[in-house]
Image (cartoon, rainbow, N blue to C red):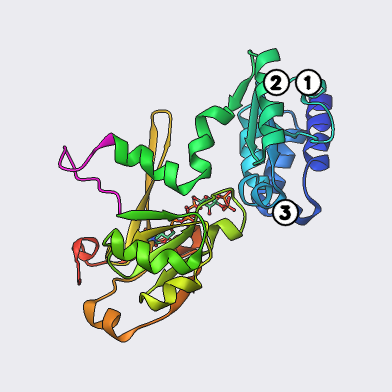
Amino acid sequence: MVVENMRMLRLMEENRDTTMVDEDDETKTIKKVLNEGLIEPIKLVVGFALTSKKRKSFLQPKFEGLARLKGIVFVAIDQDKPLSEQGPFDIVLHKLSGKDWQQVLEDYRQTHPEVTVLDPPDAIKHLHNRQSMLQVVADLNLSDTYGNVNVPQQLVIKKDASSIALKVAKERLRLPLVAKPLVSDGSAKSHELSLAYDQYSLQKLEPPLVLQEFVNHGGVLFKVFIVGEAIKVVRRFSLPNVSKRQLSRTSGVYRFPRVSCAVASADDADLDPDVAGKDSK
Ligand SMILES: Nc1ncnc2c1ncn2[C@@H]1O[C@H](COP(=O)(O)OP(=O)(O)OP(=O)(O)O)[C@@H](O)[C@H]1O
Ligand SMILES: O=P(O)(O)O[C@H]1[C@H](O)[C@@H](O)[C@H](OP(=O)(O)O)[C@@H](OP(=O)(O)O)[C@H]1O
């Protein structure tokens, strides 16, 4: 048992980025427990294929350690070697884009039906494009049902920035508009959003993109995470409302950073309970 745990520890060390070796007390405790053989035997091997950015944000040493205590280990997939020659895995966890990788996964699913691929390329392809991503929600037709789920008015611009103003006028989209890259592939570029205040500045945008009417939402939003039966809701700070007055006085295109990421948590903020419902338009 101790030998197996030491082997596992080595595996975890080998699979870790050199940028991730900052050890806190909890990590040291986990290592001590591992060394002393006090933990569960390995029940599940998860092969992962992630970008180095994702590996750093998701596979943090503490998380890996806690998973190991529950008998789950994470092993890096070497993309330069055939997937079938690696493992054996119980689960393949991935977040990589590209047709070649999708084909590798599809082939692997055929030859290894016993392995759970999270998620199969076919099941997540609509999330790689912001138009199809939102279409799924629009198709659910949830407005005026039990709650009220609406989708912002939006327009896809594939090319030709000079034609945007005309298209926007034709579709009667109201300014300001949020411009989002059409492709959503996890790259930094795909997260670069901007806000266009006036018609003239629309030509400065860079297609392919999705234009959405800006929806005032009181500067906070809720993110809902669902895994199986588990549901977690977090509150995050977001873009503040844009008033009519502000709109009439502002022009141009403004890039905005990752406003509602994890560091923008508003879970503990003391907010006016009505704030998310106010509309200053
Ligand atoms: N139509 C909209 N009206 C008002 N604000 C918006 C709108 N769309 C997006 N935002 C703001 O932009 C932020 C990011 O938008 P979005 O979630 O579409 O992009 P993302 O890159 O996928 O973000 P994330 O990385 O947080 O998942 C939101 O948190 C919200 O603050
Ligand atoms: O931390 P939350 O609020 O869950 O937001 C996530 C986004 O929803 C994801 O889209 C980001 O992943 P990608 O950068 O791979 O798209 C993801 O990027 P990260 O894994 O680098 O943190 C997060 O920004």
Query: Residue visible at 82% across and 26% down?
Result: 82
Task: Give amino acid for label 1.
Answer: Ser
x and y percentages locating residue 40 in the rendered image: 65, 24
Residue 144 at least partly seen: yes
Q: Which of the pair 270/113 is nearer the observer?
A: 113
Image marks 1 and 2: residues in contact by CB distance under 8 Å: yes
x and y percentages locating residue 191 in the rendered image: 54, 59
Look at discs 2 and 3 and give the one toward the viewer: 2
Is 61 left, or right, of 191 in this rendering? right
Q: Which of the pair 106/50 is nearer the observer?
A: 106
Residues in magenta? 140-152
The residue pinned by badge 2 equals: 108
The residue pinned by badge 3 equals: 23
Task: Say if disc 3 is inside 8 Å of ligand 2.
Answer: no
SS category of the residue bearing label 1: helix
* 143 part of magenta stretch: yes
Vertical relation: 234 (above or below) 229: below
Image marks 3 and 1: residues in contact by CB distance under 8 Å: no
- The quarter holding residue 252 reads bottom left
Query: Residue visible at 40% across and 59% down?
Result: 211
The numbered mark, 2 or 3, whose residue comes first in the sequence reads 3
The residue pinned by badge 1 equals: 84
Mark 3 surroundings: few (<14), some (14-19) or many (≥20) residues within 10 A: few
The numbered mark, 1 or 2, whose residue comes first in the sequence reads 1
x and y percentages locating residue 69 in the rendered image: 63, 32
Q: Which of the pair 93/148 is nearer the observer?
A: 148
Task: Give amino acid for label 2.
Answer: Tyr
- The quarter holding residue 133 reads top left
Is 160 left, or right, of 213 in this rendering? right
Query: Residue visible at 62% across and 42% down?
Result: 63
